[in-house]
Image (spheres, rainbow, N blue to C red):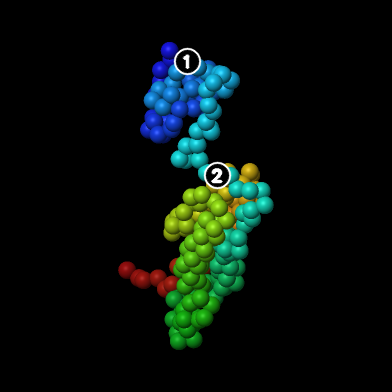
Amino acid sequence: MAHGEMGDVSRQLGPGWYPDPFGEAPLRWWDGTKWVAAVSGHAPGLPTAPPVRYATDRRPLPPETPVYTTWIWLVVLLPLLSTVLSLATIGGVSRSLAAFAHPSPANLVLLTSPGYLVSSILGWVIFALSIVFSRLDHRTLERRGVERPFHWAWSFLAWPVYTIGRAVIVRRVAGGRGAGVLWASIAVLVVTIAAGVAVSLILMSAMLQLVHQLPSTGA
């Protein structure tokens, strides 16, 4: 007689046919405490039991269940707003740096210009909104029947962490649907990184010009 242990999950199951953990047959009989020699699901006179469903499994979604929400698209697209504003205000920021070489009330006022201030605080506003929208998206997925969706608190690390993790779990339970969020997140991430590199290069150029314009101090 073949004996084996399946762990705490199997010990809680009643006698029945379950997937063979030894891989010798499609099904093997579990008598409630151990595996026995009877294999396959065709042994006469023995009742059948549903397949084992482990705690890590998630129930598949019905095909008609929507997998996208307004909130997830806001989380994905919000960083583009910050990118556009950064590109639009980079000229003012560069002039603000140049003001240090020729300090005067007319030049230093650029440091408190609306564009400069908005560019400075918008990143924090978008960060907060991403967390709020991630939470709303998480709640919507739960109402639609997604078991244990990717937790919204991951958005505290960065918005792509939540959107990409969310897409992976939704695709798993929705038969491959929901990949649009994944690809959109990657596209937005590429755009924001490219824009960030461009802004950094422009600011670096402005700082180098500032260094050259500063009066040299004699020995």
Is 45 drawn above or below residue 154 in the view shown? above
Q: Quadrant of the C terminus?
A: bottom left
Is 130 drawn above or below residue 100 in the view shown? above
Name the amino acid type tagged 1: Ala
Could you tell me which residue is drawn at 46 percent across and 67 percent down?
128
Q: Which residue reaches farthest right? A: 64
Name the amino acid type tagged 2: Arg
Q: Quadrant of the N terminus?
A: top left
* Residue 194 shown left or right of residue 120 in the figure: right
Whole-percent x, y for residue 185 in the image = 59, 54
Nearer the observer: mark 1 or 2; the answer is: 1
User: Which residue bears the numbered disc 1?
Assistant: 37
Q: Which residue reaches farthest front? A: 45
Whole-percent x, y for residue 94 in the image = 52, 72
* Residue 38 shown left or right of residue 87 in the figure: left
Which numbered circle lies on residue 59? 2
Could you tell me which residue is drawn at 52 percent across and 23 percent down?
46
Mark 2: secondary structure:
loop
